[in-house]
Image: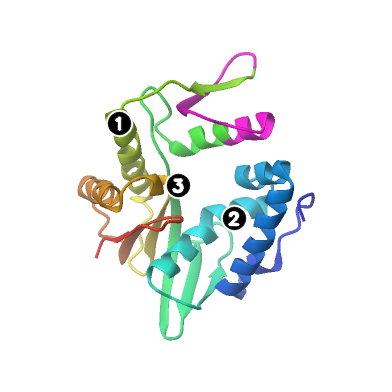
């Protein structure tokens, strides 16, 4: 499983899958990561296409389904580059979703969190670990370095607040009235729920997203959830 590019069955596009199937596979992955730290590094860094699909699209849909209180439920991943990323349903309830990820935007770093994240994941694959804060940058030697010094709470808060705002800005020209936007906030669960919700409200005040049917902000475990309307 760890050395092939083969996509697991429950990540095949244009087929309905149960979230329980995804949960069962996640249990297998956790055990493999426990036994093999190098596999965990590959999984977290998204070294195979299905790993990126898992973390960048299915996680957002799964976290939304759990925030909605669904005990069961199904999901269908759309074709690549379609307007809709994934659809979820539970009985008569369904949501057609675009998924985007958000992370901190650091002073003097890239204005796009994804570029920082890509360097961090490359650092993780090469070194087996990554610590500290952004921004991340590549030296002429090829080494990837980042800020490992202590930072203030205000700098950290502003970086994560800007991350949500930038995520909405990237999607502001891709709005569709029959879709809902899910912002999967990576590593934001370290904050109190009230702080995360204040970041989400700040982002919506800065970038109104009236073109979507709704905007959902979600984090991983422990889950925090905020819906625009």
Residue 122, magenta (yes or no):
yes
Q: Position of residue 70 (x, y in %)?
A: 43, 76
Q: Position of residue 196 (x, y in %)?
A: 30, 49
Decide: is 219 above or below 12.
Answer: above
Decide: is 185 above or below 160.
Answer: below
Q: Earlier in the sequence, mark 2 or mark 1?
A: 2
Q: Earlier in the sequence, mark 1 or mark 3?
A: 1
Q: Position of residue 59 (x, y in %)?
A: 51, 59
Q: Position of residue 58 (x, y in %)?
A: 54, 61
Q: Is residue 8 left or right of residue 200?
A: right
Q: Which residue is mark 1?
A: 153
**Residue 186 — which label?**
3
Colour scheme in use? rainbow
Contact, CB < 8 Å: mark 1 with mark 3?
A: no
Residue sitting farthest toward the left: 205
What SS does tag 2 mark?
helix
**Residue 53 — which label?**
2
Q: CA distance from mark 1 to mark 3?
A: 18 Å
């Amino acid at each position: 499983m760890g050395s092939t590019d083969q996509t697991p069955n429950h990540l095949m596009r244009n087929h309905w899958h149960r979230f329980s199937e995804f949960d069962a596979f996640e249990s297998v992955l956790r055990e493999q990561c426990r036994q093999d730290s190098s596999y965990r590094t590959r999984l977290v860094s998204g070294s195979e296409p299905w790993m990126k699909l898992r973390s960048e699209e299915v996680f957002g849909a799964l976290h939304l389904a759990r925030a909605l209180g669904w005990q069961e439920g199904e999901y269908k991943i759309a074709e690549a580059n379609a307007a809709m990323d994934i659809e979820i349903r539970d009985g008569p309830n369904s949501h057609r979703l675009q998924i985007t990820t958000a992370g901190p935007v650091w002073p003097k770093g890239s204005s796009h969190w994804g570029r920082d994240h890509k360097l961090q994941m490359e650092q993780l694959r090469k070194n087996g670990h990554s610590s500290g804060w952004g921004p991340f940058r590549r030296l002429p030697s090829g080494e990837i370095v980042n800020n490992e010094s202590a930072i203030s709470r205000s700098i950290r808060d502003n970086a994560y607040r800007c991350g949500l705002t930038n995520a909405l800005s990237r999607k502001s020209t891709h709005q569709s009235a029959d879709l809902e936007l899910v912002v999967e906030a990576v590593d934001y669960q370290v904050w109190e729920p009230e702080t995360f919700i204040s970041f989400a409200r700040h982002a919506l005040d800065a970038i109104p997203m009236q073109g979507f049917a709704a905007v959902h902000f979600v984090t991983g475990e422990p889950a925090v959830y905020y819906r625009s309307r």
